[in-house]
Image (cartoon, rainbow, N blue to C red):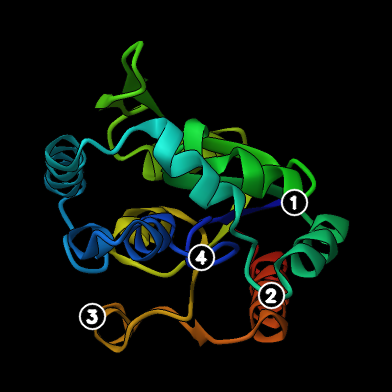
Amino acid sequence: MNIACLDLEGVLAPEIWINVAELAGVPELRATTRDVPDYDALMRQRLAILADRDIRLQNIRPIIESMAPLKGARDFLNAMRERYQVIILSDTFYEFAGPFMRQLGWPTLFCNRLDVDQDGRIVGYRLRQGDQKRHAVRALRSLNYRIIAAGDSYNDATMLAEADSGILFRPPDYVAREFAQYPVTNTYDELEAAFLEASIARAADPA
């Protein structure tokens, strides 16, 4: 059986931090893993900005509540569920992801948690596991599932490499060039077709 592992931001939902940056008027928060591949460095940068601007979780939540999944994402996800078990592997946080999960019909999500003090200040974060996307794919493969994974950025690279098949969805040009071994898709129809092609290819592979 094939399991589809999907990134959240950039594949099914817009980039949360970019929208927070724009709506909160803090352009420094626009950086993502497309810009800073080192996730720990990126999060320390974000936490420092939040502390400096005294931006708290209660300031961020209304912004996220106002956001919607990418156009066509829910229909794509529903179509995928007819063929595959689907798991979303994301570097976001449960404290941020709830509104998107509700709008997407509560798919399975593996992500991380924020450390928030009693006044709503975001003082740290807890990874479920270092390089958790790769470890999740490896664990699923150890159960004799075949994994097809899709992502868009640097933080998806090890997940795509660990999967039986990897697919890029709307990556920046420099990511597509750096990881040219993966097919690039730009629409949900193309992404669904790439999953089907990978499924057929793997089914024909006796290994």
Going by the numbered disc 3, the residue's amino acid type is Glu
Q: Which residue is mark 2?
A: 71
Q: Which residue is mark 1?
A: 103
Q: Earlier in the sequence, mark 3 or mark 1?
A: 1
Q: Are marks 4 and 3 in contact (CB under 8 Å)?
A: no
Name which residue lies at 77% across and 55% down: 84
Q: Which residue is mark 3?
A: 178
Pointer 3: residues within 10 angstroms few (<14), some, or many (20+)? few
- Furthest toward the top, the residue is 118
Q: Earlier in the sequence, mark 4 or mark 2?
A: 4
Q: Is residue 70 above or below residue 91?
A: below
Q: Which SS class for mark 1?
A: helix
Q: Are marks 2 and 3 in contact (CB under 8 Å)?
A: no
Going by the numbered disc 4, the residue's amino acid type is Pro
- The span from disc 2 to disc 3 (Cα, nearest Å) is 27 Å
- The span from disc 4 to disc 1 (Cα, nearest Å) is 13 Å
Pointer 2: residues within 10 angstroms few (<14), some, or many (20+)? few
- The span from disc 1 to disc 2 (Cα, nearest Å) is 12 Å
